[in-house]
């Protein structure tokens, strides 16, 4: 498939970035774990785990789109299922965010933890449906969704680390001095 072959470099770069970021996230979580705060498991399921899922979805999509499929149909079904699974997962994350009591959510948090990931996964589903008739456009939809998931994961990972370093660490240090 010539349309898919033209995306090879894009998915090689994006997939490598996602793989590296997954590894980096593991390192950071290990470092933060040395100073655990109260109720971190509840917050981790709502804030940290989705980043790994986003990076994992990017890595999976990059791998799926590197396979030399004979037609776009199989690929579209697989990326559509990935998108559908992502939609379901984002709904679960939204519920976890609502019930967690560690952090008060702001508009930016809802945007980056729910709205944008939901849009990216929905874009995967819609692109899969359009792929048989509009292959070129559908591939741009998958590329856009993949980049959106990558950047959302980067933003959320950075936000979490900054929170742990500047807010959580400060609070822990204050409690230790008493």
Image (tube, rainbow, N blue to C red):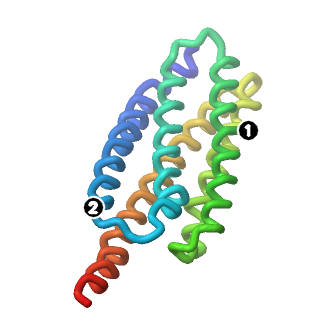
Residue 177 visible:
yes
Q: Which residue position is annotated with label 1?
A: 126
Q: For the residues marked 2 and 1, what is the alpha-carbon distance in whole angstroms?
A: 43 Å
Q: Position of residue 15 (x, y in %)?
A: 42, 34
Give the left or right position of residue 159, taking residue 120 as reference: left
Residue at 61% across / 56% down in the picture? 116
Q: Position of residue 74 (x, y in %)?
A: 67, 18
Mark whose residue sits in front, 2 or 1 = 2
Give the left or right position of residue 72, taking residue 161 as reference: right
Is 33 or 136 nearer to us in this picture? 33
Q: Residue furthest top?
A: 70
Which quadrant would the C terminus be assigned to in this image?
A: bottom left
Q: Position of residue 154 (x, y in %)?
A: 42, 54
Residue 115 visible:
no
Location of residue 9 with respect to 157 vertically, above or below: above
Location of residue 24 with respect to 15 vertically, above or below: below
Image mark for residue 139: none
Q: Position of residue 30 (x, y in %)?
A: 30, 53
Q: How crowded is the residue under tag 1: few (<14 C-alpha within 10 Å), some, or many (20+)?
A: some
Image mark for residue 34: 2
Q: Secondary structure at mark 1?
A: helix
Location of residue 106 with respect to 10 vertically, above or below: below
Q: Quadrant of residue 79?
A: top right
Q: How crowded is the residue under tag 2: few (<14 C-alpha within 10 Å), some, or many (20+)?
A: few
Residue at 35% across / 69% down in the picture? 164
Residue at 48% across / 51% down in the picture? 51
Residue at 53% across / 47% down in the picture? 149
């Amino acid at each position: 498939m010539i349309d898919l072959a033209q995306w090879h470099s894009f998915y090689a770069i994006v997939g490598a970035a996602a793989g590296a970021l997954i590894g980096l996230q593991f390192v950071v979580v290990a470092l933060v774990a040395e100073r655990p705060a109260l109720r971190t498991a509840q917050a981790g399921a709502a804030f940290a785990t989705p980043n790994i899922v986003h990076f994992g979805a990017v890595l999976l999509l990059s791998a799926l789109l590197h396979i030399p499929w004979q037609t776009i149909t199989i690929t579209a079904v697989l990326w559509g299922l990935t998108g559908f699974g992502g939609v379901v997962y984002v709904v679960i994350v939204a519920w976890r965010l609502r019930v967690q009591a560690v952090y008060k959510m702001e508009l930016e948090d809802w945007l980056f933890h729910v709205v944008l990931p939901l849009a990216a996964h929905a874009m995967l589903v819609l692109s899969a449906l359009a792929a048989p008739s509009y292959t070129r456009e559908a591939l741009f939809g998958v590329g856009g969704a993949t980049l959106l998931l990558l950047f959302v994961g980067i933003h959320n990972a950075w936000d979490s680390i900054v929170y742990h370093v500047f807010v959580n660490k400060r609070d822990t240090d204050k409690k230790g001095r008493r």
